[in-house]
Amino acid sequence: MTSYRQPGVVLTDHHFSVPLDHDDPSGERIELFAREVVASAKADADLPWLLYLEGGPGFGVRRFTGRQAWLGRALQEFRVLLLDQRGTGLSTPANRQTLPLRGGPREQAGYLAHFRADSIVRDCETVRRELTGGAPWTVLGQSFGGFCATHYLSTAPEGLRTVLITGGLPSLDATADEVYRAAYPRIARKVEAHYARYPQDIGRARRIAEHLAEHRTVLPGGYTLTPEAFQSLGILLGGGDGSHQLHYLLENAFVRTDRGPALSDAFQEGVASALSYAGHPLYAVLHEAIYAQDGRPTDWAAERVRGEFARFDAAKTLAGEGPLYFTGETIHPWHFEADPALRPLRETAGLLAARTDWPALYDTARLAANEVPVAAIVYHDDMYVDTEHSLRTARAIRGLRTWVTDEYEHDGLRAGAPRVLDRLLALARGED
């Protein structure tokens, strides 16, 4: 362990060894990284633990400086553990560079089958027993972290003191097809709201898409920007300031050159940064797998279901006169052709999409008998997690208390900072 200081906090880096497959504890092991954070004035105090599970899948935990955002509120009463979930951050990485060490696509897919919420929660239990001496802890789950927390309640509630979920109450039984069938209308509403705010972007988006349809465009770093890839910038629209980010990106798209209008370097650099999965490839590779548990393959659900919503078809849009609809949190086969960080993983992703033996993620009977205090913020018309799905799950978990709000978008934990965490703690304790 290594300890050091930032303003107002003491940080300690931890490394843990866990089984790749928890059902085979004597088999291969991987490493987890986690960062402990405690207020400087309480560094030697006996404090309860709060485990933070980041959204994703596939993102390393946020790197805070000092007492940023919600962390400052948490440090008033907790010793906080920021966990890089398996395959992310400083935990044993899983990406195009490391996965070939496993062998070919079939071996890679078999390896990655152990990187869902069920394995992550068993990791958490291993870490908890080592750190707390067996005492239960509070879990704060953002987005996919909330999916993990819901699985935690299903399988190891004895490890939980309290559960706090922000924008991450999953459906307990929806298939991937049903998830995306609910998602596309939400995405459409976000696009329409964006165009209502910035009507000038209707023409800009069409002009960019038309240019991309006529000119093969490769961004800095090797990303091939097609009209469909350009549409995926709609993922920005689920955040509090995402509409504004998209607008400022579009307004700077073209420059005059000696060969006519061209996409500006600034635009290309911004798009490359927004679209690349180099820093979080598991988000793309495992995204649909987080919904899989019904014995059926996910089979590129977002791509198949998109065919039911003609407004998202770029070619049809450009052949007509309507506005171009951006897509959102959807992963498509072409991602594994466009993005150089994903190209070597295309066959691996295809094998995961065809997999049918995913285990169940949620125990509805156990959730119905839940005794752990749980509070969840549900964002009204959340682009990433369906509100109706979340509310059905809230009703299925005994004692869960919800805060339904349109004050924030999906990133409300970051935007609302201490207020959001304070409200959730009060809800869980029955004080609100």
Image (cartoon, rainbow, N blue to C red):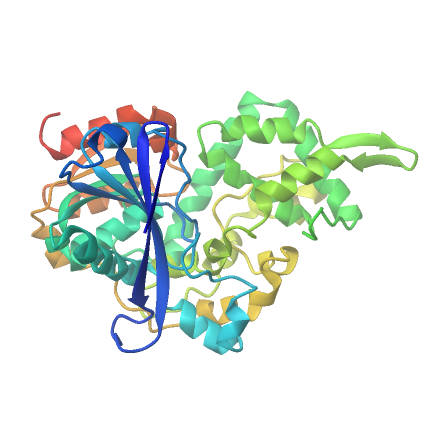
Residue 167 percent across, percent down from the top left: 32, 39
Residue 33 percent across, percent down from the top left: 36, 54
Drawn side of residue 128 relative to residue 226, left or right: left
Quarter of the image with the C terminus in it: top left
Residue 96 percent across, percent down from the top left: 56, 63
Drawn side of residue 232 relative to residue 266, left or right: left
Report which quarter residue 100 is drawn in: bottom right
- 232 above or below 99? above
Report which quarter residue 25 is drawn in: bottom left
Drawn side of residue 311 relative to residue 107, left or right: right
Closer to us: 348 or 111? 111
Name which residue lies at 13% across and 54% down.
Answer: 133
Name which residue lies at 15% across and 36% down.
Answer: 45
Name which residue lies at 13% across and 49% down.
Answer: 136
Name which residue lies at 49% across and 52% down.
Answer: 280
State whether residue 167 appears in this view.
Answer: no
State whether residue 42 appears in this view.
Answer: yes
Image mark count = 0
Drawn side of residue 61 relative to residue 214, left or right: left
Residue 107 percent across, percent down from the top left: 47, 77
Q: Residue furthest right?
A: 258
Closer to us: 115 or 50? 50
